[in-house]
Image (tube, rainbow, N blue to C red):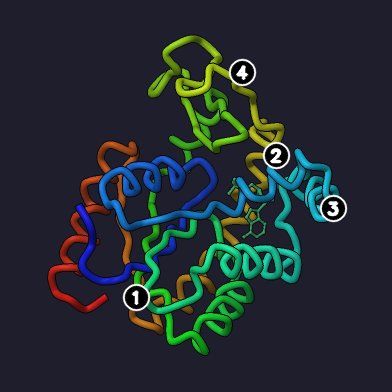
Amino acid sequence: MSLVLPLRLLLLGAPGSGKGTQTSRLLKRFSNLHSLSSGDILRAQIAAKSEVGNKAAEFIKNGKLVPDSTMVELINTELELRGWLNEASSWILDGFPRTRTQAEALRKVLIPRKATVNMVVELDVDQNVILERIEARWVHVPSGRVYNLDYNPPKVPFKDDITGEPLTKRSDDTAEVFQKRLDQYNLELGPLKEFYRDLGVLHRVSGNTSDTIYPKLERLILEKDKKNDI
Ligand code: AMP
């Protein structure tokens, strides 16, 4: 089905909270939605050995955030290239913005185009549960498809379901780096939420599996769409 009104949605959530999984499900459900994942864009830059990619790799390896100026430029360029900077486009951003500075920059680039982010949803997942399952996460880098050996295994072990290409482990999914990424997320979350709460667009859905979170997220979107206020 298609949404009636444009939806510009941000998913906030700790690393490993399932932002990518929720995004894939929403794309399957709503035909006029598109998505962009900042992590996937960075990994593509790293694989291409671009200047930005080489710089970003150092930060990512250490569980640190890539500097705001680099991220804002990268995402703005991508939004422009895709023709999404207008009031009619519907999209989901997964992993951007991650800081209040990035959120302010995104707002600044959208306002002259008469567009705004009209829904922000925090995916609230118990961080102990995330830590337990992160070691089992494998990814297909070219597509960003994510598998979990326990909950969502590939049909053929360690191979992508669609292309048959090998899956890899993200180098930043080790216990040590992952804890740093969680700490960083917890540090930035407060100011980011405050920014969107003040704009009246912040929501939260809680649950420990993607299957419990997804229906709540979908319901939120459908309710908003029905009320014609997004
Ligand atoms: P993700 O795939 O979303 O978990 O992102 C992987 C890594 O890329 C993060 O741990 C950060 O180092 C970096 N990254 C992704 N998005 C951003 C962002 N919006 N701001 C800063 N760093 C980011």
The residue singled out by tag 2 in the image is 177
Q: Residues within 10 Å of mark 3 (few under 14, many from 20)?
A: some
Across and down, in percent, residue 69 comes to: 74, 71
Is residue 220 positioned above or below 129 on the image? below
Circle count: 4
The residue singled out by tag 1 in the image is 201
Residue found at the far bottom of this picture: 112
Q: Amino acid at mark 1?
A: Val
Q: Which mark is residue 72?
A: none
Are circles 2 and 3 on residues that touch, CB within 8 Å?
A: no
Q: Secondary structure at mark 2?
A: helix
Is residue 47 positioned above or below 8 on the image? above
Residue found at the far top of this picture: 156
Disc on the earlier residue, 4 or 3: 3
Q: Amino acid at mark 3?
A: Lys
Disc on the earlier residue, 2 or 3: 3
The residue singled out by tag 3 in the image is 55
Disc on the earlier residue, 3 or 1: 3
